[in-house]
């Protein structure tokens, strides 16, 4: 029986690459995204190679939707072996005094609360299975901070702290929980806002490996954290940023 | 008791498995026993050609024979990583036999347990020279070839103790923490050349090392008392090193991976 993986934010960018990587390893892939058309598109791409894949809509900040998603997956496939929480984003870039309370909360909810809700529901299932791996997504900004992205940096740092606690809590159930922290990555969302030339000038001299990441670079790390090769790893933070941080 | 290895079935897939290190040349210092031996075996299974480099010649020959028995190309080289000429000879023999180096794993290390106030200057020097100096000398010996190839992987074994410290292990902790600083600096220096440099911090593993100052019963009780309830085996450490050495980790450099069943999170 193939293993079942749920990938939030699986419709685009890093999530899409992770869905493809997991699919290539023979896992049954559930692509959960608020952008249903994008999720459906990725499902089609993966299904073409003969892998079982499903596309489901979810707003990870909505507890009821998250519960419905997890019970739907449990009903269809009976289990969840791997959860990659990738849905998130910085949403705004502006000075702290220009952030409204609503905007602040939106950034925290999208990144941190979404991770909490997904982990809570999936952990209940994994505890019954007495096995599972969860991979949350932070950012190098969790460690370095980023001017004009204070709420995002806070949410991502929050995910790192949350992950460590959850790792301790779930370790007795044989569930491993780790965080991946991507650096500058060429996702469609980022590339829309910046020309390749501007991106080169901004990053290439700062990154020791001399290039920004492709989503596939990140996907390999997420995959590694699902394999038995990482069986003794839990509660850890994994940067993937070409040496920037 | 939970055995995570047994429950973790995700690997492989529908397609034929590719050897991840096919024809790569890997030098593993301290390769004759414990974690180093596990690294040699796991890399050989993925198609790498192995140089088992160790001060303990006889044990290195033993591991080499094990590698050859599973069909791998391997040689044993006697080396004192704290001696410049000895490391140079290791490099010469590596290039003579294989003509290149793709992966350098700095695993050779020692510790001499004693309170700081009782520690001799000679013991201090020895620990620092082997654990940290070995990283420096091996980098100097092998980096020129990696630079020329515009590729290479350096993976250094530090320790959880680099983060936590350890009673009567001050020199060891200092040397291992220093490795982390060295690795980060070297990663910045060599990134533009396409060479990645990373460190691994294993927790206390099921090897001879933790047994030196404890009974078997004490050792196992201590090894089991991790959040995952899983005894850290040399293979648990070899797996992440294999990942860092493979193409899958091409974009990862300057990082420190903690492998400790959840005992230290930093």
Image (cartoon, coloured by chain):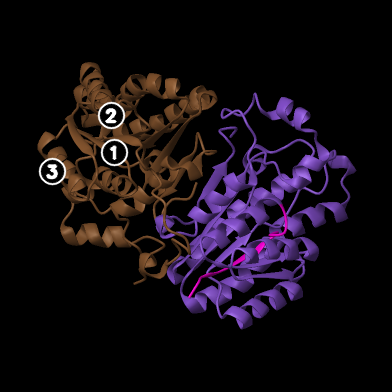
Q: Nearer the viewer, mark 1 or mark 3?
A: 1
**Does dot 3 land on a helix, a strand or a loop?**
helix
Q: Is residue B194 left or right of residue A140?
A: left
Q: Are marks 2 and 1 in contact (CB under 8 Å)?
A: yes
Q: CA distance from mark 1 to mark 3?
A: 16 Å
Chain under disc 3: B
- For the residue pair B241 and B165, the one nearer the viewer reads as B241
In the picture, residue A229 is in which quadrant?
bottom left
Q: Colour of chain B?
A: brown
Which residue position is annotated with label 1? B49
Picture mark count: 3
Q: Is residue A94 magenta?
A: no
Which label is found at residue B62? Answer: 3
Residue B196 visible (yes or no): yes
Residue B113 visible (yes or no): no
Answer above or below: position of A230 versus B6: above
Q: Earlier in the sequence, mark 2 or mark 1?
A: 1
Q: Are marks 2 and 3 in contact (CB under 8 Å)?
A: no
- For the residue pair A178 and A208, the one nearer the viewer reads as A208
Which label is found at residue B98? Answer: 2
Q: Colour of chain A?
A: purple
Q: CA distance from mark 2 to mark 3?
A: 20 Å
Q: CA distance from mark 2 to mark 1?
A: 8 Å
Q: Residue at coordinates 61% horizontally, 57% vertically from top-left?
A: A20
Within-10-Å neighbours for mark 2: few <14, some 14–19, many 20+: some
Q: Residue at coordinates 66% horizontally, 27% vertically from top-left?
A: A204
- For the residue pair B155 and A96, the one nearer the viewer reads as B155
Answer above or below: position of B264 versus A145: below
Chain under disc 2: B
The boundaries of the magenta stretch are A1-12
């Amino acid at each position: 029986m193939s293993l079942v993986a749920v990938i939030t934010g699986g419709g685009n960018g890093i999530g899409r690459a992770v869905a493809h990587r997991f699919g290539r390893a023979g896992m049954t892939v559930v692509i959960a995204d608020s952008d249903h058309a994008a999720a459906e598109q990725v499902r089609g791409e993966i299904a073409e190679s003969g892998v079982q894949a499903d596309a489901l809509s979810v707003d990870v900040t909505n507890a009821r939707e998250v519960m419905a998603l997890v019970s739907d997956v449990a009903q269809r496939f009976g289990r969840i072996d791997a959860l990659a929480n990738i849905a998130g984003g910085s949403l705004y870039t502006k000075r702290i005094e220009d952030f409204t309370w609503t905007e602040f909360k939106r950034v925290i909810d999208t990144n941190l609360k979404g991770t909490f809700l997904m982990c809570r529901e999936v952990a209940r299932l994994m505890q019954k299975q007495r096995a599972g791996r969860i991979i949350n997504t932070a950012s190098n900004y969790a460690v370095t901070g980023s001017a004009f992205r204070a709420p995002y940096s806070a949410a991502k740092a929050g995910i790192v702290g949350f992950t460590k606690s959850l790792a301790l809590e779930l370790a007795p159930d044989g569930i491993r929980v780790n965080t991946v922290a991507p650096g500058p990555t060429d996702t469609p969302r980022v590339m829309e806002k910046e020309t390749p030339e501007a991106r080169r000038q901004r990053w290439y001299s700062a990154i020791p490996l001399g290039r920004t990441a492709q989503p596939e670079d990140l996907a390999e790390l997420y995959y590694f954290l699902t394999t038995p090769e990482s069986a003794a790893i839990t509660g850890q933070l994994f940067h993937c940023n070409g040496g920037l941080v | 008791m939970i055995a995570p290895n047994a429950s973790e079935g995700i690997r492989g897939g529908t397609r034929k498995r590719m050897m991840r290190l096919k024809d790569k040349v890997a030098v593993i210092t301290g390769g004759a026993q414990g974690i180093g031996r596990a690294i040699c075996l796991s890399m050989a299974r993925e198609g790498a050609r192995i140089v088992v480099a160790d001060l303990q010649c006889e044990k290195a020959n033993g591991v080499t024979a094990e590698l050859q028995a599973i069909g791998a190309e391997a040689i044993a080289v006697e080396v004192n990583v704290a001696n410049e000429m000895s490391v140079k000879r290791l490099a010469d023999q590596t290039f003579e036999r294989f003509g290149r180096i793709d992966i350098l794993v700095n695993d050779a290390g020692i510790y001499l347990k004693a309170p700081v106030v009782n520690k001799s200057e000679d013991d201090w020097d020895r620990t620092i020279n082997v654990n940290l100096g070995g990283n420096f000398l091996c980098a100097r010996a092998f980096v020129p070839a990696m630079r020329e190839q515009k590729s290479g992987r350096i993976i250094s074994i530090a320790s959880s103790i680099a983060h936590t410290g350890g009673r009567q292990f001050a020199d060891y902790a200092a040397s291992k923490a220093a490795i982390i600083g060295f690795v980060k600096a070297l990663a910045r220096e060599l990134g533009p050349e396409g060479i990645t440099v990373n460190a691994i911090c294993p927790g206390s593993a099921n090897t001879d090392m933790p047994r030196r100052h404890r009974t078997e019963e004490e050792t196992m009780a201590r090894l089991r008392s991790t959040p995952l309830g899983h005894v850290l085996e040399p293979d648990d450490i070899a797996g992440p090193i294999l990942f860092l050495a493979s193409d899958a980790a091409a974009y990862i450099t300057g990082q420190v991976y903690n492998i400790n069943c959840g005992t230290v999170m930093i």
